[in-house]
Image: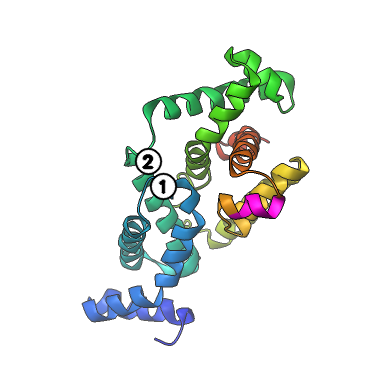
Amino acid sequence: MENISNNAEQIAIYQQSGEIALRNEIVLNNMGLVRSCAMSMRNMYIRHGDTDDVINEGVLALMDAIESFDPAKGAKFETYASLKIRGAIIDFLRKQDWIPRNVRKFARTLDKANSLLYNLNGRVPTTAELAEHLGIDEDKLLKQMAECSCTITLSFEELLYEDNIDEPAVDAPSDSGLLREEMSREIANAIDELKDKERQVITLYYYKNMKYSDIAKALGVSESRVCQIHTKAVLLLKAKLEPYFKGGTV
């Protein structure tokens, strides 16, 4: 197989023949996809987990995608496989016990507080408002926001991918593409409403796949500050996008 454009043809042959050597060839030719997904999500596990373990989970998901891919349902294999891979990585990270229980607990509390204040006031809550609602001072809130950044990020990834990794419906392949375009627009609109620094961090993290340390250098701030900004930005995106993903309006 010369390139990934031959995936559909090769997979069709494999699904008929069951030839393991052919499946392994397809896996090898798509390892770049696995590594790309793993590296784009590395800020969620880099301090606690091993990249090789995450890549192994991605490979298993890729193999499952090869078995279950159906081109008649309207998706490209690369799109279908990447969603499967990211979903598997999210599931793997969620099951790990890398993050202290108190950090996970605070992340959930912070998420709920942010959503509550956002819905009550119809705008993004300030750090002072969040601190007052949680009964802590702003300095402590900022410190804890930095600590729970990876947990907040994981919950956002779950929102984006957990309920959206199924293959398109058989009878509506074009609808699937339209839904993905609509979802991309909703996310882009939500990002556009962020403050400049928040938008920069989100763009560098999700679209440029940069590590927190590299983002910190690019913006001329500390890595801890990048974590704080990222947490605040993701909380806002979650609050704005959750109604959309749950079937309501944004």
Residue 106 at x, y percent in the picture = 48, 24
Q: Residue 113, position in %: x, y?
A: 58, 21
Q: Residue at x 34, y 68 (%)?
A: 66
User: Magenta residues, as a range?
Assistant: 214-219
Q: Which residue occupies the foreground of this view, 199 or 88?
A: 199
Q: Is residue 113 above or below residue 22?
A: above
Image x and y of residue 38, in percent: 44, 58
Q: Which residue: 66% across, 48% down?
A: 201
- Where 128 falls versus 209 (above or below)? above
Is the residue under label 2 in contact with that under label 1 (CB below 8 Å)? yes
Disc 2 target residue: 94
Residue kind at label 2, given as amino acid type: Arg
Residue 19 seen from this side: no
Give the left or right position of residue 213, taking residue 31 as reference: right
Residue type, numbered disc 1:
Ile
Q: In the displayed structure, does residue 66 sit left or right of residue 150?
A: left
Quarter of the picture holding the C terminus? top right
How far apart are labels 1 and 2 at the CA level? 6 Å
Q: Which mark is residue 119?
A: none
Bin the neighbour count of mark 1 within 10 Å (Cα to Cα): few under 14, some 14-19, many 20 and up.
Answer: many
Query: Is 119 included in the stretch rendered in magenta?
Result: no
Q: Is residue 71 visible?
A: yes
Q: Which residue is mark 1?
A: 90
Secondary structure state at the residue bearing disc 1:
helix
Q: Residue at x 44, y 54 (%)?
A: 86
| 222 on left or right of 2 | right
